[in-house]
Image (cartoon, coloured by chain):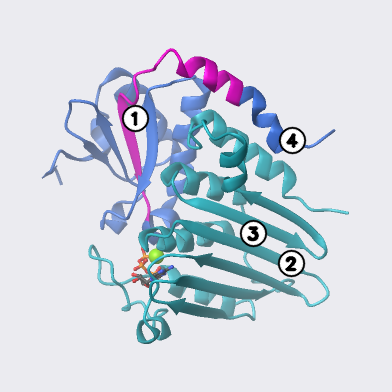
Chain colours: A cyan, B blue
Amino acid sequence: MEDLSLHILDIAENSINANAKNIEISLIEEKEKDLLTLVISDDGIGMTKDFAQDVTNPFQTTRMTRKVGLGLAFLEEATKSANGKLTIESTPNIGTKITATFQLSHIDRKPIGNIAETIVMLIAGNPDVDIKYNHCVDELQFIFDTKDIREIYPNIPINLVNVLSFIRKYISENINLKK
Amino acid sequence: MAKIKIEDLDKIAEDVRRKMNIREGAGRVKITVHMGTCGIAAGARTIMNTFLNLIELQNIKDVIVTTSGCAGLCSREPMATVEVVGQAPVKYADLNEERAKKIFEDHVMKGRYVEECVLSIGSERIQ
Ligand SMILES: Nc1ncnc2c1ncn2[C@@H]1O[C@H](COP(=O)(O)OP(=O)(O)OP(=O)(O)O)[C@@H](O)[C@H]1O
Ligand SMILES: [Mg+2]
């Protein structure tokens, strides 16, 4: 994967496959601590403790079409090469929380990439799932939540191409948090 | 310049409301872009965006784009399936932006398969 936005799409796909109805993604940049934290949590079917413990092993997968699962192994590799780590917390029938940390200034830390395109793709493919995105740069914050759109526009299908295009523009214009 | 706000969706919402009365043919063609780690790493998101942009640019109302899990053929990603109502689904492999555009122009809009990218038609495998 080239950048973190593609990892996010991939990890959120795991949540979709776990029948999540709500996915929360947050990306927190803390310059003082030289830390970038990515958290993806869902309310899907979860994993047992044993399964979750070994899940970054590529042979730990429930997929049917192929014997290896690569998504979490790739993300773990990305954290390690930037002086960070991957933590997985999961409870069956409650949900899963994936936390990936990176040294913000590390030369091998992957760039954030195009978050707007990732969110739009998730919504287009899964219009019934609610997606919340939270981005913090030090004390500045940007939040996008599909629930807000549904609340203000209850009769508009969220996956209409015009709406998706609006969302893409909205996120890319507001995500650059600067003082 | 003021940044775009959620309320700026008002205009689109108004437009949608007006047009929904006309009752459009809900989906003549369905395009499914395959995901999974291999698909994403190979560029599935770009393929998805290409289709969405074409639909928006050409103001097309009867084409649906969605995603599905990985199809299991990792070496042939990115892949997409085009389903015209009443016809067998066609699975395309080894896509890039240019091929996606061609599939859109030829197959989605004119009903002609783009043979050089076809992986299978219906349930039958070609290669
Ligand atoms: N959010 C989640 N909720 C429940 N189970 C999960 C979740 N994320 C991962 N899993 C489990 O962990 C396994 C491994 O996930 P991983 O993303 O590494 O590979 P995969 O999804 O199986 O395949 P790939 O990502 O290569 O397409 C999955 O098959 C699934 O069983
Ligand atoms: Mg996965």
- Given this view, does label 4 or label 2 mark the residue nearer the observer? 4
Q: For this view, does A53 lie left or right of residue A82?
A: left
**Front-most of A152 and A72?**
A152
Q: What is the C-alpha distance between the residues marked 3 and 1?
A: 31 Å
Question: Looking at the image, which residue is at 38% across and 32% down?
Answer: B64
**Residue A161: where, in percent of width, then height?**
50, 31
Indicate whether residue B21 is drawn in magenta: yes
* Secondary element type, mark 4: loop
Reading the image, the residue beneath label 1 is B103
The residue that mark 4 highlights is B4
**Mark closer to the chain start, 2 or 3:** 2
Q: Amino acid at mark 3?
A: Ile
Residue marked by disc 2: A29
The structure residue drawn at horizontal position 47% and vertical position 64%, both measured from the top left corner, is A11
Say left or right for A24 vs B60: right
Q: Chain of mark 3?
A: A
Task: Give x and y (percent) for residue A111.
Answer: 65, 61
Could you classify mark 4 by the number of other residues whose Cα lies within 10 Å: few (under 14), some (14-19), or many (20 or more)? some
The type of residue carrying mark 2 is Glu
How far apart are the two marked residues, 4 and 3, measured between alpha carbons?
22 Å
Residue A78 in view of the camera = no
Residue found at the very far top of the displayed protein: B22
From which residue to which does the magenta span run?
B13-35
Mark number, residue A112: 3
- Which image quarter holds the N terminus of chain B? top right
Give, as a three-letter code, the residue at label 4: Ile
